[in-house]
Image (cartoon, rainbow, N blue to C red):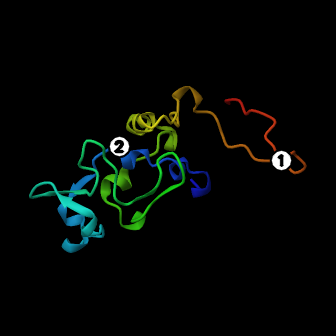
């Protein structure tokens, strides 16, 4: 999905809702890519992104405000849980964890199984600039 239309770029709820824990060797001080300075130890085998191991989690790498324009300050070096977390609706599959995180911040779910046939709509040459139609499922 193009980042220009990626709802994750205006969300960030998962980064401020879940603990991000991962195998210790993913950090750069153990040969991995995740900046160790942005992590904290959980136990002998696990680390967490700083800020996510609390009652009100908020990843230290999240830049911007949840529900606004957001980005990950270490996107290319993010840990496995972040790489594997999929946006709800990606590839037509709901992600209840994504929807739960969004709900915590008053954001609507991104996907509903009954709407799987909705496709992107493109502006036709000569069409007005403002949206004057609603696209229906399938």
Q: Earlier in the sequence, mark 1 or mark 2?
A: 2
List the residue tagged with mark 2.
Answer: 17
Viewer-side residue, 32 vs 60: 60
* 136 lies above or below 36: above
* 90 lies above or below 21: above
Is 136 displayed left or right of 71 in the figure?
right
Query: Where, by quadrant of the figure, is residue 94 drawn?
Result: top left
Q: Circle 2 — which element?
A: loop
Is 125 displayed left or right of 36 in the figure?
right
Is 104 displayed left or right of 121 in the figure?
left
Q: Residue furthest left?
A: 44
Q: Image point 39% across, 65% down: which residue?
A: 74
| Residue 34 x, y percent position in the rendering | 30, 67
List the residue tagged with mark 1.
Answer: 129
Q: Image point 25% across, 72% down: which residue?
A: 28
* 90 lies above or below 76: above
Is 100 displayed left or right of 51 in the figure?
right
| Residue 97 x, y percent position in the rendering | 37, 37
Q: Image point 75% across, 47% down: which residue?
A: 122
Q: For mark 2, does the 10 Å Cα neighbourhood hold few (<14), some (14 to 19), or many (20 or more) residues? A: many
Viewer-side residue, 58 vs 137: 58
Q: Residue furthest top?
A: 114
Q: Circle 1 — which element?
A: loop
| Residue 71 x, y percent position in the rendering | 47, 58
- As measured in the structure, the alpha-carbon distance from the residue carrying label 1 to the one carrying label 2 is 37 Å
Query: Where, by quadrant of the figure, is residue 117 drawn?
Result: top right
| Residue 138 x, y percent position in the rendering | 68, 30
Q: How many marks?
A: 2
Q: Nearer the viewer, mark 1 or mark 2?
A: 2
Residue 77 is labelled as none
Q: For mark 1, does the 10 Å Cα neighbourhood hold few (<14), some (14 to 19), or many (20 or more) residues? A: few
């Amino acid at each position: 999905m193009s980042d220009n239309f990626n709802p994750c770029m205006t969300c960030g709820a998962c980064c401020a809702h879940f603990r991000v824990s991962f195998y210790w060797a993913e950090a750069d001080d153990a040969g991995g890519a995740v900046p160790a300075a942005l992590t904290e130890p959980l136990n002998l085998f696990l680390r967490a992104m700083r800020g996510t191991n609390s009652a009100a989690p908020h990843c230290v790498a999240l830049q911007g405000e949840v529900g606004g324009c957001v980005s990950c300050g270490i996107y290319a070096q993010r840990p496995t849980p972040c790489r594997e977390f999929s946006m709800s609706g990606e590839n037509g599959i709901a992600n209840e964890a994504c929807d739960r995180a969004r709900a915590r911040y008053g954001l609507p779910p991104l996907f509903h199984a009954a709407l799987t046939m909705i496709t992107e709509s493109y502006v036709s040459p000569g069409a007005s600039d403002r949206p004057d139609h609603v696209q229906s499922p399938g």
